[in-house]
Amino acid sequence: MFIKELFACKTANVEEYRRLVQGRQRLLRALCALGVLAELAAFFAVPRLVAAGAHGEFCKGFYTGVGLALIVCGIVGERRLAALLRNEEKLKQARCRDKDERLQEINRRAQLAAGLATLAVLYGVMLAGGLVSFELLVFSAAVVLVFFVSFIAFHCYYERRL
């Protein structure tokens, strides 16, 4: 869903939509490449950089799982888009579905609500975790700061672009 939002459907015809779908395919291939990098990190970087023991095994499993998830999601998504590109009728239906203003508004509101929920959880972790661990407080505050700085930067960018 987030990948679709990155390439919002503002196409005038089916050929432009075809190019948009091909751009989504390229993005999904990049997602697969990130998965491969995570797998390589799990097998080569983690054993060298993380201490042995339970923590090292957890990190290796975490990177392996994330890498595999990225690869599978990328391949499945790319295959679906390839099938969509082969069928002209389904391509037209998908274009109409992507241009539906009601669905776009639902996606926008869902993303806004998810962002607000994430911020609320981060503030809770920052306030409660700060009583237990200073590092947790600093990390949570840094993530909230990154969120707000990126929000302002993207707001300025889209204000000029749209």
Image (cartoon, rainbow, N blue to C red):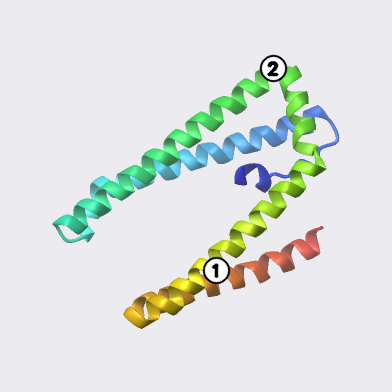
Query: What residue do we see at 44% from left, 45% from top?
Result: 34
Secondary element at image label 1: helix
Q: Nearer the viewer, mark 1 or mark 2?
A: 1
CB of mark 1 within 8 Å of CB of mark 2? no
Left or right of 91 in this view: 117? left
Earlier-in-chain disc, 1 versus 2: 2
Query: What residue do we see at 54% from left, 25% from top?
Result: 79
Residue 160's place in the image compared with 136, above or below, is above
Residue 138: image location, x then y, percent: 41, 79
Residue 139: image location, x then y, percent: 41, 74
Residue 114's place in the image compared with 133, above or below, is above
Instruction: Find residue 120 and name its label.
Output: 1
Query: What residue is pinned by disc 2?
Result: 87
Q: Residues within 10 Å of mark 1 (few under 14, many from 20)?
A: few
The mark tally for this picture is: 2
Please identify the quadrant where the N terminus is shown: top right
Q: What is the three-letter code of the residue carrying label 2?
A: Asn
Q: Is residue 47 visible?
A: no
Q: Quadrant of residue 20?
A: top right
Q: Residue furthest right?
A: 12
Left or right of 51 in this view: 96? right
Please identify the quadrant where the C terminus is shown: bottom right
Query: What residue do we see at 57% from left, 62% from top?
Result: 117
Is 118 in front, or is 51? 118
Q: Residue furthest left?
A: 53
